[in-house]
Image (spheres, helix red, strand yellow):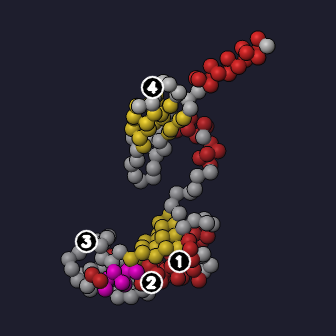
Amino acid sequence: MKLTAALSLLLALLAGCAPATRVVLLPQEGRQSAVVVEAGGATTTLAQPYTEALVYPRQPLEVDQISPEKVQTRYRELLAAQPAPEEKFTLYFETGGAQLTPESMAQLADLISRARARPGGEIIVTGHTDSVGAGPANDQLSLQRASAIRDLLVTRGFDASRVDAVGRGEREPIVVTPDNTPEPRNRRAEITIR
């Protein structure tokens, strides 16, 4: 009986040493991120990659900087289960319509192959225009461009519920121009595969 009680006490002490929760901030591709951790009335913000917050029962929060190697070792299986980073493609259009340029038509095979490698993922197609024409007409044209790419993907076997089409008109130019300026780099669709 005493051995069982001693073992129970030892397990309880060991459990008290292990954090109830660990929060590790991983680096984000191309952007900065942060996470706020609150526990026991204390708050801390993790803003540097590989910063770790340890939450123990009835103890103050602990913050530590750990190495990328330690994260890889400790969370190998979890990291392996992450989805692949999103991929982006840009296709360009002929003036005034939803016809792709010959160069962009040539890129379609690669785009479709990369999208097929992600079964179940989503595809977002965002259409854009240059500044030639009126705002409402450009909104409509940008949506037509996005819808044309979406329809093309659906006819190539992608589930329609996986592919969204959005038009942004002339609001997000790659090259800022005065009104009514034809700019081929702004006549585009941005495709995000995630």
In the picture, measured across the screen, residue 166 lies left or right of residue 138, that is right
Spatial CA distance of label 3 from label 4 is 51 Å
Residue contact at pointers 3 and 1, CB within 8 angstroms = no
Spatial CA distance of label 3 from label 1 is 27 Å
**Secondary structure category for the residue under label 2:** loop
- Residue drawn at point x = 29 percent, y = 83 percent: 136
Is residue 118 among the parts visible in the rendering? yes
**Secondary structure category for the residue under label 3:** loop
**Secondary structure category for the residue under label 1:** helix
Q: Is residue 161 above or below residue 79?
A: below
Q: Earlier in the sequence, mark 3 or mark 4?
A: 4
Q: Main secondary structure of the magenta part?
A: helix
Q: Earlier in the sequence, mark 4 or mark 1?
A: 4
**Secondary structure category for the residue under label 4:** loop
**Amino acid type at mark 1:** Leu
Residue contact at pointers 2 and 1, CB within 8 angstroms = yes
Q: Earlier in the sequence, mark 2 or mark 1?
A: 2
Q: Mark 2: give few (<14), some (14-19) or many (20+) Cα within 10 Å.
A: many
Spatial CA distance of label 4 from label 1 is 54 Å
User: Residue beneath label 2, please?
Assistant: 100
User: Of circles 4 and 1, which is in front?
Assistant: 4
User: Of circles 2 and 4, which is in front?
Assistant: 4
Q: Is residue 152 above or below residue 72?
A: below
Q: Earlier in the sequence, mark 2 or mark 3?
A: 2
User: Residue beneath label 1, please?
Assistant: 108
**Amino acid type at mark 3:** Val
Residue contact at pointers 2 and 4, CB within 8 angstroms = no
Residue contact at pointers 3 and 4, CB within 8 angstroms = no
User: Which quadrant does the N terminus fall into?
Assistant: top right
Say which of 124 and 180 sits in front.
124
Q: Which mark is residue 60?
A: 4
User: Residue beneath label 3, please?
Assistant: 176
